[in-house]
Amino acid sequence: MTVLGDDIYCHQPLCQQLLDQHLNFILVCRPQSHTTLYEHLQDIELPTVTVKRWTGTVEETYIYRYLNGVSLRDGEDTLLVNWCELTVSRPDGTVTYKNSFATNHNLNDANVVEIVLAGRTRWKVENENNNTLKTKGYNLEHNFGHGKQHLSSCLATLASTDPLSVLRQLGSFAHVHAGRSRARYPAQYQLNFHTENCWMYVEGLDIRRQLMVKSSTPC
């Protein structure tokens, strides 16, 4: 298992704890917070992999640089990590993306592209999951003041289960099979169905769920 995280998590105590738990990591590693590591990269001819990709309108150049066995911090007890960087640019010189990562995965020309891609997928989770919870009616905000033990988890659970309880109540009388064009229920509880995938939309509550079901299974 590989743990992904932002630059704030890329420090030796956490990295060592992950390794002690037999976990891998790919963590953002910025120059501003890892001066010792980037000092070690200076004046070194870094292994480089270049990939050209067509976006449909313009060709972009992906330049991957990496180095294994770099000190994460200063000191004799420093943890050695493997560093990689991706820079994406266009023919006019515009840099559209640049980021770097520290990992315990050994890097080479064959896997550096895959490792960087894995590190970047954290943003997919951030955008498609966390931002949805924050901006699409779930009313979950970034808050670090909800107690010191389990209060924040409790509040998040309550906020998440409230719409689910409504769907459960609807399900008690909306017992139909996937594949039917439309269930005849009041407009405020109108359900639309599609073969093998049941999309439930509850008007007035702005709740949308996809229930993964087989065509022969009631939803």
Image (spheres, rainbow, N blue to C red):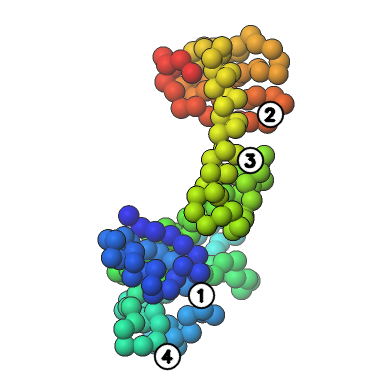
Q: CA distance from mark 1 to mark 3?
A: 32 Å
Q: Residue at x 57, y 24 (%)?
A: 167
Q: Is residue 31 above or below residue 6?
A: below
Q: Callout 1, which amino acid?
A: Arg
Q: CA distance from mark 2 to mark 4?
A: 59 Å
Q: CA distance from mark 3 to mark 4?
A: 50 Å
Q: Dividing the image into 4 quarters, which one contains the N terminus?
A: bottom left
**Mark carried by residue 74:** none
Q: Is residue 111 above or below residue 190?
A: below
Residue 69 visible to an observer of this rendering: yes
Question: Between 166 and 133, which is closer to the camera in this rendering?
Answer: 166
Q: Where is residue 123 shown, x and y percent of the image?
A: 53, 56
Question: Between 174 and 198, which is closer to the camera in this rendering?
Answer: 174
Report which residue position mark 2 lands on: 205
Q: CA distance from mark 2 to mark 1?
A: 42 Å
Q: Where is residue 141 shown, x and y percent of the image?
A: 64, 51
Q: Residues within 10 Å of mark 3 (few under 14, many from 20)?
A: some
Q: Callout 2, which amino acid?
A: Leu
Quadrant of residue 187 in the image? top right
Residue 61 visible to an observer of this rendering: no
Which is nearer the N-term, disc 2 or disc 1? Answer: 1
Q: Is residue 47 above or below residue 115?
A: below
Which is nearer the N-term, disc 1 or disc 4? Answer: 1
Q: Callout 3, which amino acid?
A: Tyr
Q: Mark 4 falls on what kind of element?
A: loop
Report which residue position mark 4 lands on: 43
Mark 3 or 4, which is nearer the eye?
Answer: 3
Which is nearer the N-term, disc 1 or disc 3? Answer: 1
Q: Is residue 135 left or right of residue 169?
A: right
Report which residue position mark 1 lands on: 30
Query: Is mark 2 in CB contact (under 8 Å) with mark 4?
Result: no
